[in-house]
Image (spheres, rainbow, N blue to C red):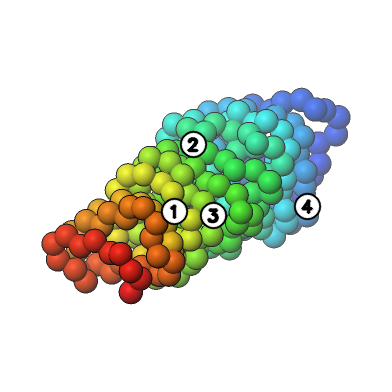
Amino acid sequence: FADVTWGNGKMLGGPGSLTANSYTLTNSANITNVYVLAGAGGLNKSSGEGNFTLSAANTFGGAGVTNTVSAGTLTLGNASALGSTSSSFELRSGGTLNLNSYSPTFSTFTFAGGNLSGTTNTLTANSGFVVTGGTMTISNRLEGNGGFTQNGAGTTTLQKANYAGTTTVSQGSLVTTGTNWTATVSPSTISMVFTGTVASGNYPIYPGSFTGSQTLSTPT
């Protein structure tokens, strides 16, 4: 197909496969899909308050593709439910991504609002994590070598940051809790290195609050 828009209909038979340039989910009813979704494009849960469960080992997407959820719930029912690990993902206001028992890998993962269900799961973003939404607490373990960018006006609290790379705060504020990591924060140009066992508590990072290099050994 060129593009597939999936409302409340159900496919009979299968399992089988579908190939399309893109997939748009608008279901208000709850749908479980067992067909493999293939193709070079992405998947967008754009409207409808229903839950859509991806139960097959999908292969859609690839480099330069961003999958999104901005309405209803998208549930992972397979370790490869979201297709290519070279795709990016954006969680938007109004949408819920239910990780179920899976720990997916992405190129970039963007928190633009919405809800993440499955907070004990690990998220891996090889090109980094980005926050553009409001105030939020991210309880998931964050892995990958692409760093983290705080670009939302609110406060983001990271409870299990374990990624590598540069941490950038361009607006809003970033709070970390009891973790070991290296961060280069701009525009405040503060270089922080956490090594060994860091005392439990909150470590607020605010743009422009510091100048030069600081090493934090106790919470503030």
For mark 3, give the secondary structure: strand
Q: Where does label 1 land, which residue? A: 161
Is 64 left or right of 192, judged from the image as shown? right
Relative to 58, say whether 30 is above or below. Answer: below
63 on left or right of 26:
left
Residue at the image position 36 percent from the left and 44 percent from the top: 164
Which of the two discs, 1 and 3, labels the residue nearer the N terminus? Answer: 3
Q: Position of residue 171 (x, y in %)?
A: 30, 65
Q: Residue at x 60, y 28 (%)?
A: 59
Crowding near the residue tagged with mark 3, few <14, some 14–19, many ≥20 C-alpha atoms within 10 Å: many
Identify the amino acid type marked 1: Ala
In the image, 216 versus 162, the foreground residue is: 216
Disc 4 + disc 3, Cβ < 8 Å: no
Instruction: Select label 4 or label 3 by which is in front.
Output: 3
Q: Identify residue for label 4.
A: 30
First in residue order: circle 4 vs circle 2: 4
Q: Please identify the quadrant where the N terminus is shown.
A: top right
User: Dividing the picture into quarters, in which one does residue 37 lie?
Assistant: top right
Give x and y (percent) for residue 219.
35, 71
In front here: 129 or 152? 129
Q: Which mark is residue 87?
A: 2
Left of 179 or right of it: where is 3?
A: right
How many C-alpha atoms fall within 10 Å of the one at disc 2: few (<14), some, or many (≥20)? many
Q: Give the distance between the C-alpha atoms of the residues marked 4 and 3, in whole angstroms.
A: 26 Å
In the displayed orientation, state which residue is furthest to the bottom.
220
Closer to the chain start, of discs 2 and 1, is 2
Q: Distance of mark 1 from mark 3, alpha carbons?
A: 8 Å
Q: CA distance from mark 4 to mark 1?
A: 33 Å
Amino acid beneath label 3: Asn
